[in-house]
């Protein structure tokens, strides 16, 4: 074979990138060829018989479909989709309607309101709104205390320096647009020296810290 013939053969190679995009890539091009062949069969009974064989092949190639409800009907729906909904056969299920099958999912509205304090998280604002609507009394006082302890913990995860109670109290009032007034006699419990505040996925987790401490104590006893 000459170099020119070899170059021509390379140019004739059929790459996936140059082929038509598959409607159902999980079934591959061989199924597409089978479906295209179906359309050329003139006898309707024979065409329907071959369609059942193609669906069986699709089931073998895509066993995950068994995890779906009514998977048998879904396979036939997929057959029609691969055929571009242009398939005249006797199927056990009605032919799917393209407009319904290809309808775009509803858009879920997401909050685009910026977070007031990223180190506390977005959910903290919902909690503050809830506490702000609570009538004055012991229940609200307890809720404010619990919120402050949680916010202090979140603060220390992202800011390793110690934080004064007054800083947390001021943040609560500011984030609530001053709808919450922290009682002047509230104080938070002291943080244990063994407390470990780590960012998610970073550093040593709590279990590792405890294990390390126990190992150190065991060595001292020896």
Image (cartoon, grey):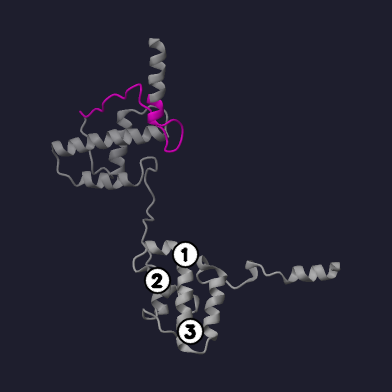
Answer few, some or many: residues within 10 Å of disc 2's Cα (few below 14, many 20 plus, some between 14 and 19). some
- Give left or right: position of 160 versus 126: right
Task: Check residue 189 for magenta coloring.
Answer: yes
What segment carries the magenta color?
A: 185-210
For disc 3, the marked residue is 47
Residue 67 location in percent, x, y? Answer: 38, 61
Crowd around label 1: few <14 · some 14–19 · many ≥20 (10 Å): few
Dot 1: what SS?
A: loop
Q: CA distance from mark 1 to mark 2?
A: 11 Å
What label sits on residue 49 in the rendered view?
none
Indicate the position of residue 37 as horizontal and vertical percent values: 55, 81
Residue 62 - label:
1
First along the sequence among labels 1 and 2: 1
Q: CA distance from mark 1 to mark 3?
A: 22 Å
Label 3: which secondary element = helix
Pick the quarter of the image with the C terminus: top left
SS at mark 2 in the image: helix
Specify few, some or many for label 3: CA neighbours under 10 Å numbering under 14, 14-19, or 20 or more.
Answer: some
Residue that label 2 marks: 74
Furthest toward the bottom, the residue is: 42
Q: Quadrant of residue 56?
A: bottom left
Q: Residue at x 62, y 71 (%)?
A: 19
């Amino acid at each position: 074979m000459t170099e020119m013939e070899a170059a021509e053969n390379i140019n004739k190679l059929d790459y996936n990138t140059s082929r038509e995009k598959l409607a159902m890539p999980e079934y591959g091009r061989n199924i597409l060829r089978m479906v295209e062949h179906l359309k050329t069969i003139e006898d309707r009974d024979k065409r329907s018989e071959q369609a059942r064989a193609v669906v069986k092949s699709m089931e073998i190639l895509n066993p995950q479909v068994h995890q779906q409800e009514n998977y048998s009907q879904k396979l036939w729906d997929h057959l029609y989709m691969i055929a571009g909904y242009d398939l005249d056969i006797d199927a056990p299920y009605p032919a799917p309607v393209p407009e319904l099958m290809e309808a775009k999912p509803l858009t879920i509205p997401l909050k685009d309101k910026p977070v007031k304090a990223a180190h506390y998280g977005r959910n903290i604002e919902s909690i503050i709104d809830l506490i702000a609507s609570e009538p004055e009394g012991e229940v609200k006082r307890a809720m404010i205390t619990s919120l402050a302890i949680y916010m202090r913990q979140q603060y220390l995860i992202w800011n390793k320096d110690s934080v004064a109670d007054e800083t947390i109290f001021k943040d609560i009032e500011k984030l609530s647009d001053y709808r919450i007034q922290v009682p002047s006699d509230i104080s938070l419990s002291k943080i244990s020296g063994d407390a470990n505040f780590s960012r998610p996925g970073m550093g040593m987790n709590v279990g590792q810290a405890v294990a390390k401490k126990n190992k150190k104590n065991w060595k001292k006893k020896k």
